[in-house]
Image (cartoon, rainbow, N blue to C red):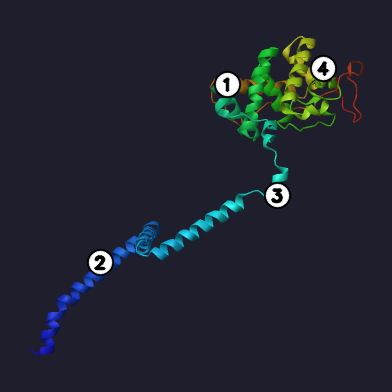
Amino acid sequence: MTAREKLKDLLSPVLRSAGVFVRDVGAGLLEVSHNSLALLGLCVVAAAIFAGGRADLRATVEQHALDWLLARQEARDPSPAMIALAEPDAVSRATAVDLSALPRQQAAVVQWLSRRYRVAPEPVGRLVQEAWQVGQRMGIEPTLILAVMAIESSFNPFAQSPVGAQGLMQVMTRVHDDKYEAFGGTHAAFDPVTNLRVGVQVLKECIARAGGLEAGLRTYVGAANLTDDGGYVGKVLAEQLHLRKVADGKQVAFNAPLPSVSPPVAAQPSDAAPSSPGGEQVAMLR
């Protein structure tokens, strides 16, 4: 056997071992690299170890980090124009409430109404809270107040009908301007809480004048002198039933249907309500 062959025989085990080592290391690195977060962590550790032994490098990194934080802070500082427009007390005008402050019953109603009418829960929470408080004082069920509000405006505080009914409860502002005097004038019709309070007062008057709930709702919507209310009373009472169930802790689908609405049928001319300029008949009670 030649010397070359002997050398080859001696090196073969070494080469095989080296090959196994390289393959194992490669497979390990490949496995680690599959997890990008693990690879990133290794890089960070390596960089930290390297920087730890270099005081000058560590100081440079710290300076860059400080500069970046200062830049971020400066970017958050308001501009002079925003400082001039700032109004720290503006939040006091917001019609909103912290939902954690509501009783469980009211909170359940809030969440249901928020999903059903696609409105933010915080302002709806304030209205639900107000409906409970005003309803107890006025002797009107809170769920009825909320049902009327839902059918009248779908919780749009700036809603206005073709005949001039305005706000959440769609009160005829020009008819009930006297009721808004206690709140600073008729522009308060677009303040949600004020509109709710005035609307409840009008609703109570309608029920008392008509002698019952259903007749009072017909009067409220201006259908007292019509043979058909267009399905209004049925929709309000159905929505109130939904709200009662929700308040009682029962499950009600947020897309639960309401009775279909049919066009109102005019009564005989002798019973007709005053006509609006647009030709629609309007009862001047709300």
The location of residue 195, given as percent across then percent down, is 75, 25
Tell me which amino acid carries mark 2.
Answer: Asp
Q: Is residue 224 visible?
A: yes
Q: Is residue 231 visible?
A: no
Q: Secondary structure at mark 1?
A: helix
How far apart are the two marked residues, 4 and 3, measured between alpha carbons? 58 Å
- Specify the farthest residue to the left: 1
Determine whether 131 is above or below 167 in the image. above
Mark number for residue 126? none
User: Which dot, 2 or 3, sits closer to the camera?
Assistant: 3
Q: Which residue is mark 1?
A: 247
Give the total of numbered labels. Answer: 4
The location of residue 211, given as percent across then percent down, is 77, 9
Q: Earlier in the sequence, mark 1 or mark 4?
A: 4
Determine whether 208 is above or below 280 in the image. above
Q: Earlier in the sequence, mark 4 or mark 3?
A: 3
Mark 1 surroundings: few (<14), some (14-19) or many (≥20) residues within 10 A: some
Q: Which residue is mark 4?
A: 224
Q: Which residue is mark 2?
A: 24
Foreground residue among 258 and 154? 154
Foreground residue among 225 and 246? 246
Name the residue at 69% across, 45% down. Answer: 83
Mark 2 surroundings: few (<14), some (14-19) or many (≥20) residues within 10 A: few
Q: Earlier in the sequence, mark 1 or mark 2?
A: 2
